[in-house]
Structure formats: C-alpha cells, structure tokens
Amino acid sequence: MEVPGELGPGFIESIYRKVLLHELQLRDVSTSTEVEVQVSYKDLTGGRYRLDIFANGQVVVELKAGV
C-alpha cells in the first residue's frame, strides 16, 4: 500500500510496476516478472498467461492501473 499511497493515482501500469519492484527489492523480497504459466483445467490446457510479478516464489501480484 506504500507505493500507491506515495505515488498517488494517474500513472500507467509500467511506472507502478517499476516502483513496486524497487520497493520489494528494498525489503529483500525476491521477485520475477513476466513469468509465463500454463493454465490448465482438468484435462484441458486453456493457454498461457504472464504474471506481472511473482514474489518469493509464492505470491502472484497482478497490477492494474486506472485513470
């Protein structure tokens, strides 16, 4: 909550991503970006999806920026 509180609204998603990644690195949180995962449902492969940020190998962060 610190990043959007500090920056405020109105920026594009790529700016929030860059700043959030910096904040997570300052807090020693390991991150990966644009991680591609396969989406499966029962015996169907639905497709592939790119995660915005994957933190500590277990938390998915999907960024959305609105105007």
Image: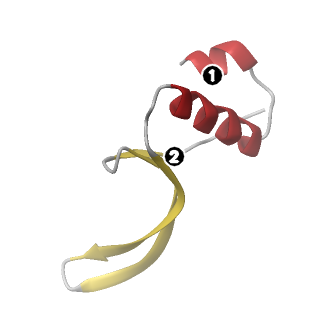
Q: Is residue 23 visible?
A: yes
Q: Nearer the viewer, residue 6 or 25?
A: 25
At 28% from the left and 85% from the top, the residue drawn is: 44
Helix or strand or loop: what does disc 2 sit on? loop
Please provide percent x and percent y for residue 20.
Answer: 61, 33
**Could you tell whether 36 is left or right of 10 in the image?**
left
Please provide percent x and percent y for residue 40.
Answer: 29, 76
**Could you tell whether 25 is left or right of 58 in the image?**
right
Q: Nearer the viewer, residue 9 or 61?
A: 61
**Could you tell whether 49 is left or right of 7 in the image?**
left
Eyeballing the image, is 31 above or below 26? Answer: below
Q: Which residue lies under the disc numbered 1? A: 3
Q: Which residue lies under the disc numbered 2? A: 62
Q: Is residue 65 visible?
A: no
Eyeballing the image, is 34 above or below 38? Answer: above
Please provide percent x and percent y for residue 29.
Answer: 43, 35
At 68% from the left and 32% from the top, the residue drawn is: 19
Mark 2 burial class by Cα count in 10 Å: few <14, some 14-19, many 20+: few
At 72% from the left and 42% from the top, the residue drawn is: 13
Helix or strand or loop: what does disc 1 sit on? helix
**Could you tell whether 58 is left or right of 26 in the image?**
left
Q: Say which label, 2 or 1, has the lower sequence index.
A: 1
